[in-house]
Image (tube, rainbow, N blue to C red):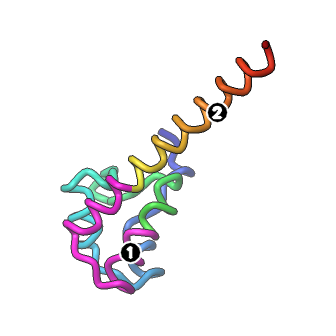
């Protein structure tokens, strides 16, 4: 893993004014992957948008960790269903165009 794709946990917490314990709680539930290098904590930059959503849910909307887990699961399910709908629409269009 390349280090330039990592963002320090301290930097994130400082920038977003959040407690490191919140991010560690997200890690324990499997919502965020935290990487440890030389006793320093990092997340991959590709996880940042998701982490920012969780921060917003918790600090702005006062949603607890269990609620964040539920919302995350439901959003993943919606995304999966949207992909299935697109696939089915493409199949219908294919079969209609071959009549």
Residue 37 appears in view:
no
At a point 37% along the width and 76% down the height, the residue shown is 57
Residue tagged by mark 2?
A: 89
Nearer to me, 19 or 94: 94
Quadrant in the picture for the C terminus: top right
At a point 45% along the width and 73% down the height, the residue shown is 11
Give how far across and how far down residue 18 sits, in percent. 34, 81
Mark 2 neighbour class, 10 Å CA radius: few under 14, some 14 to 19, many 20 or more: few
Residue tagged by mark 1?
A: 55
Identify the mark nearer the N-term, 1 or 2.
1
Q: Is residue 38 above or below residue 86?
A: below
Q: Which residues are magenta?
A: 53-74
Q: Is residue 14 above or below residue 94?
A: below
Q: Nearer the viewer, mark 1 or mark 2?
A: 2
In the picture, measured across the screen, residue 27 lies left or right of residue 51, that is left
| Chief secondary structure of the magenta portion | helix
Q: Is residue 87 within the magenta segment?
A: no
Disc 1 secondary structure class: helix
Nearer to me, 92 or 75: 92
Disc 2 secondary structure class: helix
């Amino acid at each position: 893993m390349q280090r330039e794709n990592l963002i320090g946990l301290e930097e994130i917490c400082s920038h977003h004014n959040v407690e490191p314990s919140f991010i560690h709680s997200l890690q324990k539930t499997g919502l965020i992957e935290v990487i440890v290098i030389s006793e320093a904590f990092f997340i991959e930059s590709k996880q940042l948008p998701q982490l920012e959503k969780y921060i917003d849910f918790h600090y702005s909307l006062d949603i607890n960790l269990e609620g964040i887990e539920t919302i995350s699961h439901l959003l993943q399910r919606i995304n999966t269903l949207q992909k299935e709908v697109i696939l089915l629409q493409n199949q219908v269009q294919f079969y209609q165009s071959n009549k």
